[in-house]
Image (cartoon, rainbow, N blue to C red):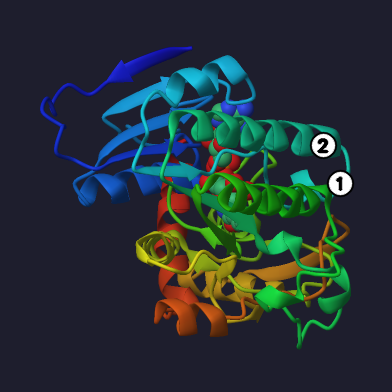
Amino acid sequence: MNFRRNFEIVNHTQMKKAIVLGAGGFIGSHLVRFLKNQNKWVKGVDLKYPEFSKTAADEFVIGDLRSPEVVKNVLDLPYDEVYQLAADMGGAGFIFTGDNDADVMHNSAMINLNVLHYGKEIGIKKVFYSSSACIYPEFNQLDPDNPNCKENSAYPAQPDSEYGWEKLFSERLFFAFKRNYGIEAKVARFHNIFGQEGTWEGGREKAPAAICRKVAQAKDGDKIEIWGDGKQTRSFLHVSECLEGISKLMESDDFHGPVNIGSDEMVTINQLAEYVIKISGKKLSLKHIDGPLGVRGRNSDNHLIQEMLNWRPTRPLIEGLRTTFNWINEQVHCS
Ligand code: NAD
């Protein structure tokens, strides 16, 4: 374990203190920046530094949160806010092949068990946990035009991946610590978050980033490979609105979730690809190939978040896709 401090901020006694676990990852690194903009003192922890820009954290610890010792050391204060985003995860190519099931379940569960145990010991006040739309039962997501992802449809449970089962277990773990030890646990179920500085190659990237990369690499006349028939539906939320959602949930006095944080602008994967092609201005077509797919249809149901937090994401998909494509295009042509 090693750590690095940003020394610019010397007197932080009056500031709220936050710790972001998974601060080297996609959403975590954006979240650190967001919390700094709210004038909080922020510690980040991860196996790695953020890949695409310098961390904004006041202190950044490189450490493995599966280790009880590391978690005990990093949870050295009764932080005002703990954000638990660290997880062994990836896109469909990582989650749905079955090859990574044991690691996905073991690694993420270990992290969550350690964080809650040592968080309770040190007296943390509020903790945010990032669950996933992958917890929803497969049988409610067979019709691509009419998936049911209402929060109260999670049980009886039948997620379509071990990643989803681990998330469901950990949601319950966070709420058990709330009931028994008074930790104010808040749980959100993210639906396909995307944006700049997200993984875009290597096998863990999600559909928007993978499609942006393929389009950025293509020349006029090429075919873009799409897994399956492309008629499966999903919604995609830009990371900026995900951060707003997290913040609204953390600020709420009496609502703890679990709640969806996702867009309800549902598109097919073919439509997603057509959007990106249009943004690129290239003349490309689609080629459908076999690949890991996940459920047939999925969309965020935003009734509960609107009702409880008086907020829901509203920005059009195409806006976020434009900035994400431009960023991935730069990465492709600079590497
Ligand atoms: P990410 O993979 O970019 O970030 C996760 C981070 O956790 C990585 O930086 C990784 O190094 C770190 N990590 C993994 N194991 C660790 C360990 N043992 N010790 C310390 N750090 C460890 O993923 P992300 O997209 O930023 O997702 C953040 C959270 O949101 C995850 O919990 C994920 O399951 C959840 N989520 C994300 C999405 C999405 O669309 N991005 C959707 C649903 C849920």
177 lies above or below 108: below
Tell me the number on the disc at residue 172.
none
Picture coordinates of residue 313, whole percent (x, y): 44, 76
Q: 16 or 64, which lies in front?
A: 16
At horizontal 79% and vertical 82% (from top left) the residue drawn is 144
> 330 and 100: which one is in front?
100
Kind of element beneath mark 1: loop
| Residue 240 as seen in the image, left or right of residue 303 | left
Q: In the picture shown, does residue 296 fall above or below 25? A: below
Classify residue 331 by image quadrant: top left
Q: Is mark 1 within 8 Å of ligand 1?
A: no
Ligand 1 closer than 8 Å to label 2 CB: no
Check contact, mark 2 vs mark 1: CB within 8 A: yes
Amino acid bearing label 1: Thr
Pinpoint residue 48: horizontal percent, then vertical percent: 50, 25
Q: Quadrant of ligand 1?
A: top right
What kind of residue is marked 2?
Asn
Query: Residue 50 at what x, y percent from top left?
Result: 43, 33
How crowded pointer 2 is (Cα within 10 Å; few <14, some 14-19, many 20+) is rated as: some
Q: Is residue 233 above or below residue 88?
A: below
Q: Secondary structure at mark 2?
A: loop
Residue 199 at least partly seen: no
Residue toward you, 21 or 221: 21
Distance from Cα at disc 2 to Cα at disc 1? 7 Å
Q: Residue at x 43, y 60 (%)?
A: 246
The picture places residue 91, in percent across and down from the top left corner, at 69, 50
Mark 1 nearby-residue class (10 Å; few <14, some 14–19, many ≥20): some
Residue indicated by mark 2: 100
Q: Which residue is label 1 attached to?
A: 97
Residue 296 visible at all: yes
Total tally of numbered discs in the picture:
2
Q: Front-most of 189 and 174?
A: 174
